[in-house]
Image: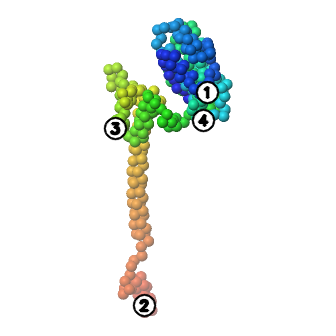
């Protein structure tokens, strides 16, 4: 299970989309579900408890892996969605859960009012981190298959900003694999229509964040994917440098070892030759040791 978080200003447009063809309302709280009109009226009525809040529309899409299809029922979806909302701190407010059947993977749209029943604003602080943690815990609890990442998303169905985000994601990921440092990465993605903007600490040269832009749209690296934050990219590029240095060190060591081995073998050969060499005697020469023995024998006979 994975989640996509959206905020908006219009309950009318959001409800109209959620209740499109091939949809089913599976759960609601604090709403009349006779039709789209009554749902919108109820959302807007509670919204007036806090009229200063511009983006009062909370919208979450929970999606499951196709491998979970056989285990998913409305009850399981509602149960896991309720637990998800609780972990996100979304409670005491109007809520609508709608199941869609227009995709291969099962998913539901959760619409909720960011103005709660008491007129207070439901916080959106650290939403992405809390959502990631909640999904991970619920996947373990229910036995849902963990998403294998953005590489499995059907790019052909994406539009607008979602499409641009994935284009940036794919370009930067490919650049990280192909490049050894920030300069190479910047040139690589720039050639492919993506630009980098670094965020520095006030009055300092220290970089604390990164954004990417394409076709006039700008996104924070971590908003595209957690692996595209400045720290994660810098770590990946440094890892590539260390890998090359390690490989070069291994090659140099192997070369030195081979040279040393050759020297040792040569030295051993010379020592062996010196210890066990046999004097070479020409055919016409007589063995000096044999000549000496003959002389000794002749002296003995003379006596």
Compare marks 2 and 1 and give the one earlier in the sequence. 1
Disc 3/disc 4 C-alpha distance (Å): 36 Å
Residue 20 can be seen in this image: yes
Is 3 displayed left or right of 164 in the figure? Answer: right
In the picture, the disc for residue 191 is 3
Name the image quarter holding residue 198.
top left
Mark 3, secondary structure of its residue: helix
In the picture, the disc for residue 89 is none
Q: In x, y percent, where is residue 213?
A: 37, 29
Disc 2: CA contacts within 10 A as few (<14), some (14-19) or many (>=20) = few
Badge nearest the viewer, 4 or 1: 4
Residue 120 can be seen in this image: no
In the picture, the disc for residue 298 is 2
Mark 4, secondary structure of its residue: helix
Q: Residue at 48% x, 18% y: name it.
A: 8
Q: Which residue is mark 1?
A: 138
In the picture, the disc for residue 66 is 4
Is 215 displayed left or right of 72 in the figure? Answer: left
Pointers 2 and 4 in contact (C-beta within 8 Å): no
Disc 3: CA contacts within 10 A as few (<14), some (14-19) or many (>=20) = few
Name the image quarter holding residue 76.
top right
Q: Residue at 35% x, 35% y: name it.
A: 193
């Amino acid at each position: 299970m994975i989640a996509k978080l959206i905020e908006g200003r219009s309950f009318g447009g959001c409800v109209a989309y959620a209740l499109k063809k091939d949809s089913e309302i599976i759960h609601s709280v604090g709403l009349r579900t006779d039709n789209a009109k009554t749902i919108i009226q109820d959302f807007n009525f509670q919204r007036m408890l806090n009229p200063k809040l511009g983006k009062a529309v909370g919208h979450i899409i929970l999606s499951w892996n196709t491998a979970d299809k056989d285990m998913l029922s409305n009850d399981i979806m509602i149960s896991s969605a309720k637990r998800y909302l609780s972990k996100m701190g979304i409670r005491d407010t109007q809520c609508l859960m709608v199941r869609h059947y227009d995709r291969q993977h099962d998913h539901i749209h959760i619409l909720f009012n960011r103005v709660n029943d008491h007129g207070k604003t439901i916080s959106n602080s650290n939403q992405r981190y809390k959502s990631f943690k909640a999904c991970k815990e619920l996947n373990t609890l229910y036995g849902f298959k963990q998403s294998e990442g953005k590489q499995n998303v059907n790019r052909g169905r994406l539009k607008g900003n979602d499409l641009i985000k994935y284009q940036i994601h794919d370009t930067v990921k490919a650049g990280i694999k192909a490049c050894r440092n920030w300069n190479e990465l910047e040139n690589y993605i720039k050639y492919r229509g993506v630009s980098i903007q670094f965020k520095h600490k006030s009055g300092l040269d220290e970089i604390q964040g990164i954004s990417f832009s394409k076709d006039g749209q700008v996104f924070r690296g971590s908003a595209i994917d957690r692996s595209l934050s400045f720290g994660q990219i810098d770590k990946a590029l440094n890892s590539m440098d260390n890998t090359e240095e390690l490989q070069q060190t291994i090659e140099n060591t192997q070369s030195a070892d081979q040279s040393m081995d050759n020297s040792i073998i040569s030295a051993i050969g010379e020592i062996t030759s010196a210890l066990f060499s046999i004097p070479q005697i020409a055919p016409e020469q007589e063995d000096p040791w044999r000549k000496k023995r003959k002389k000794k024998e002749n002296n003995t006979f003379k006596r």
